[in-house]
Image (tube, grey):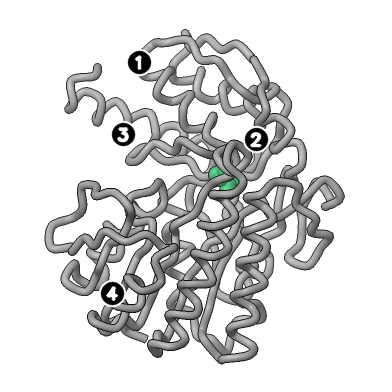
Amino acid sequence: MVFKHILVTGACGQVGSELISELSSRYGSERIIASDIKKCTLPEGVRFVSMNVLDRTAMDAVIRENGIDTVFHLAAILSADGEKNPTLAFSVNMQGTFNVLESSRINSVERVMIPSTIGVFGPETPKENVPVLTIIKPRTMYGITKYGAELLGNYYFEKYSLDVRGLRYPGLISYKTPPTAGTTDYAVDVFYHAVTGKPYTCFLRKDTKLPMMYMPDAIGAFLKLSEAPRSRLRYSMDYNISAFTFDPEGLFRVIMKYIPDLRVIYEPDFRQKIADSWPASLDSIDAEKDWEFKPEYDLDHTVRDMISHLRERLQKTGHL
Ligand code: AKB
């Protein structure tokens, strides 16, 4: 399938900003409309529309007037911010997703892509090698609403044949747009500290194992799923994917191979409870079988790439 007119919600976030670059080089920037509540820097030729996903009237107009056939719905409140403001998380993640699905159905959108998360799992979920179908009893507002979004997506596929697809992201490591609102963000923050020679205070315990992935693999996987023949997909919204697992101590050890003077202290805060309710590793076998998911970056390669890109960026902007 060739996507003709693509709408991306949450385009300025950690995933959105990198997805937009890849979409515009693959399909052409003129095919893409980036939407968010605040404008950000976008690749040349990508049009920005200021849109709140809670504004259904505005969403209908953007989709209809631009002949949108594909929506990448990334607008969401992440786990840590969701615990600070559960009401906002409920509105954006549930009502926002419902608006996208309903507007897509009414306006004949062909495909809707929605990322889910390891946040849908809870303390009763097995800790290791979690399969797609398992015990799911999230305890955070983020997890509850993202699981609700998974169920909604499945419902729209079964009831209305709207081609909705999604995958459960692990923690994502990236250097282009710093994340600010999640529980796995320590695994990004620490690089900024390491590269600039500042000590790092880690908000998780040193033995907190979580599944993780480098951003190029996360974007590659999302696009691969979006392009896969529907007939090969056994699931709609809930493919598990992950590249590797580590705890803070393990990550810092690898960083110290390249930056030996990194100093870390541990001061776990409210995010520890969130992380403790999530699994340590996922089983990606269904994604591998159905749409050939195959991450390229292992942890060492991720760390080397992060350090060199961050150094380059901070030097360019005069921060190093
Ligand atoms: C978060 O920490 O909230 C996100 C996630 C795992 O979905 N990065």
Q: Is residue 77 above or below residue 302?
A: below
* Helix, strand or loop at mark 2: strand
The span from disc 2 to disc 1 (Cα, nearest Å) is 23 Å
Q: Amino acid at mark 3?
A: His
Q: Tell me, for residue 246, which label it has, or none.
A: 2
At x 44%, y 16%, the residue is 259
Quadrant that contains the C terminus: top left
Q: Which of the pair 41/51 is nearer the observer? A: 51
Specify the quarter for ligand 1: top right
Q: Tell me, for residue 19, which label it has, or none.
A: none
Front tag of 2 and 1 = 1
Q: Residues within 10 Å of mark 2 (few under 14, many from 20)?
A: some
Q: Amino acid at mark 2?
A: Phe
Q: Amino acid at mark 4?
A: Val
Residue at image mark 1: 196
Q: Tell me, for residue 309, which label it has, or none.
A: 3
